[in-house]
Amino acid sequence: MGVSKTGAALLAAAVMTLAGCGQGLELQTSGALGPPRAPTPGASASISAGASPTNPLTPDTLEAAYEQTIAKVLPSIVQITTGDGLGSGIVYDTSGHIITNAHVVGGSKRFEVTLANGGTPRTARLVNSFELGDLAVIKVDDPTGLKPAVFGDSARLRVGEIVMAMGNPLGLSGSVTEGIISALGRTITEPVGENSPGATISGAIQTSAPINPGNSGGALVNLRGEVVGVPTLTAVNPELGNAQAPGIGFAIPANIVKDVATQIIRDGRVTNTRRAALGVVVRTVIDMNGQPAGISVVRVQRNSGAERAGLEAGDLIVSVNGTPTPSTQELSTVLAQLKPGEDAKVEILRPDGSTTTVVVPLEELPGG
């Protein structure tokens, strides 16, 4: 999440229930280091192969790996200043394209970009935002001296792998925190709110590396110096007055980031979302107790899979593939785990009180 110029600002929040979390966790968008010390003589910065009798892992070799990774990647992490606050970004190429979160740029079109080592801020403009995936690309007017980051293959990540989060938490430029990859393949959804488009992110990376307001749009980095994700959300615990839940943060996988950035840079927008859609316009229905009771179909798109399957305006979608969908948030979460071209079993409640299940061929969610 971005951070306001006078302090941390909450730009979006979401609710996601995780196993063993009591009432569940709320998610909020996450919105200076000196030069690294010289590594200990003889220390190796590579620990990817692990320790062995011939290559023992010592505090010196691990420390050297941290320091060399920071020295390699931090120059590629920038601070983005909008009209509302601050966020982070990653230099993507030598042409001046910078990747960040859509909720960081918000409604702004022009920005100031400051490098991790300081200097005069550079002006930048918005190329485009992909709000459905909470990603955006901006372009610096003067790309001289920008150092692109190296992006890794997020499909090869392992639970337990050491990672670092680099960005500008609370406006502290060039900050680094560390942790591990706690889990892979999470599906998380942001609600619609100020500067938050209500993105649903599938395959998200869960990390214990501390992520704070201002980290959003920055980098989650492995010890090979590769960007493997973009920190986006942190969890807060409602049982503790919405205090931040320690060690629970989420990042968008690098492979998704690269795909979105490539399309925006090449085509000016995302032309292939690779996301499934039912082909209907819906809204959440609230019951007499004020609780979500289902999703009402407002309109069925013509010539869509939903129309061919027999969905009609006024139908209430109760579940998809056996998963209850009491609100549009749950529907988005289910669809994010499916692919265009697949079939979805949709249980519906008709206006006359009858229930039925139809099979809907899923289409591609439009980009923009």
Image (cartoon, rainbow, N blue to C red):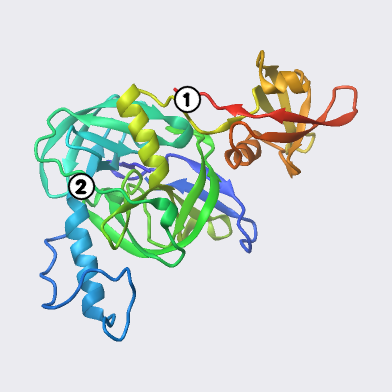
**Residue that sits furthest to the bottom in the current view:** 53
Type of residue at label 1? Answer: Gly
Is residue 111 visible to the viewer in this orientation of the structure? yes
Residue closer to the observer: 338 or 179:
338
Secondary element type, mark 1: loop
**Residue visible at 78% across and 24% down in the picture:** 315
Give me the disc on residue 367.
1
Is residue 242 visible to the viewer in this orientation of the structure? no
Type of residue at label 2? Answer: Ser
Residue 64 versus residue 168 in the image, above or below: below
Secondary element type, mark 2: helix
**Residue visible at 33% across and 43% down in the picture:** 217
Q: Is residue 71 left or right of residue 236?
A: left
Disc 2/disc 1 C-alpha distance (Å): 28 Å
Q: Is residue 232 left or right of residue 57?
A: right
**Image coordinates for residue 179, horizontal then vertical, percent:** 37, 65
**Residue visible at 58% across and 59% down in the picture:** 239
Mark 2 Cα-neighbour bin, 10 Å: few <14, some 14–19, many ≥20: many
Q: Are marks 2 and 1 in contact (CB under 8 Å)?
A: no
Mark 1 Cα-neighbour bin, 10 Å: few <14, some 14–19, many ≥20: some
Q: Which residue is mark 2?
A: 76
Q: Quadrant of residue 336?
A: top right
Quadrant of the snapshot with the C terminus: top left
**Residue visible at 31% across and 32% down in the picture:** 137
Give me the disc on residue 61.
none
Residue closer to the observer: 136 or 224:
224
**Residue that sits furthest to the front in the current view:** 54
Quadrant of the snapshot with the N terminus: top left
The mark total stands at: 2
Residue closer to the observer: 241 or 230:
230
Residue 354 versus residue 9 in the image, above or below: above
Q: Earlier in the sequence, mark 2 or mark 1?
A: 2
